[in-house]
Amino acid sequence: MPNYRVGRVAQEIQREVNDILRKRVRDPRVEGVTITEVDVTGDLQQATVLYSTLSEEPETIEDTQKGLEKATGLIRKELGSRLTLYRTPELTFQRDESLAYGNRIEELLNQIKQEDEEE
C-alpha cells in the first residue's frame, strides 16, 4: 500500500513554499520562481523542492539557486509554523529541468518542420 501521508505532506509543502516565496521572501533573486514538485523521503526528514524559473540564462539560474539557498532557513522556519509535523523536513532546492527539456524538444521539432516545408 502506498504511503498517502508522504504525498499529502509533499503537496502541502509545495503549496506553502510557493506562498512563502510570494509573501515572505524579499530576495529579488527568487522572484518569478514556481515550485513545480516536491519529493519527500518516506521518513519525512528530507524534501527536495523542484522549481522552475522564467529565465533560461545560466547566470540568472545560478543567482536564483543562491537566493533560494540563502532563504532556506526562513522558508523552513515558516514551514515549521504552518505544518503540523513533529519535525520539519530539511529542504533542498533543485531546478526542474523538465520544462527546459520540453521546450528544447519543441524547438527541435519546429526546426525539423520548417526544414521540411522549405524543401
Image (cartoon, rainbow, N blue to C red):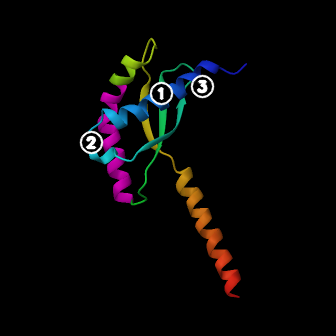
Q: Residues within 10 Å of mark 2 (few under 14, many from 20)?
A: few
Q: Earlier in the sequence, mark 3 or mark 1?
A: 3
Residue drawn at the location 44% of the way across and 18% of the way down: 83
Left or right side of 52 for 119:
right
Identify the residue at horizontal 36%, vertical 31% (top origin). 20
Q: Which mark is residue 98?
A: none
Task: Pick the quarter of the image with the C terminus.
Answer: bottom right
Q: Which residue is mark 3?
A: 7
17 to the left or right of 6: left
Residue 31 locus on image (x, y percent): 34, 46
Question: Which residue sits at x=47%, y=27%?
Answer: 13
Q: Nearer the viewer, residue 60 or 81?
A: 81
Magenta stretch, residue numbers: 58-76
Query: Disc 3 residue type?
Result: Gly
Distance (Cα) linking label 2 and label 3: 29 Å
- The answer to the question of whether label 1 and label 2 lie on touching residues, with beta carbons closer than 8 A, is no
Main SS, magenta region, reads helix
Magenta-drawn stretch contains 65: yes
Q: Which residue is mark 1?
A: 13
Residue at x 51% of width, y 46% of height? 96
The residue beneath circle 2 is 27
State the image coordinates of residue 54 (x, y, percent, origin top left).
Answer: 43, 54
Vertical relation: 10 (above or below) 61: above
Please name the amino acid that badge 2 sits on.
Answer: Asp
> Farthest residue in the top direction?
86
Name the kind of residue labelled 1 in the image.
Answer: Ile
SS at mark 1? Answer: helix
- Mark closer to the chain start, 1 or 2: 1
Rendered position, 6 above or below 63: above
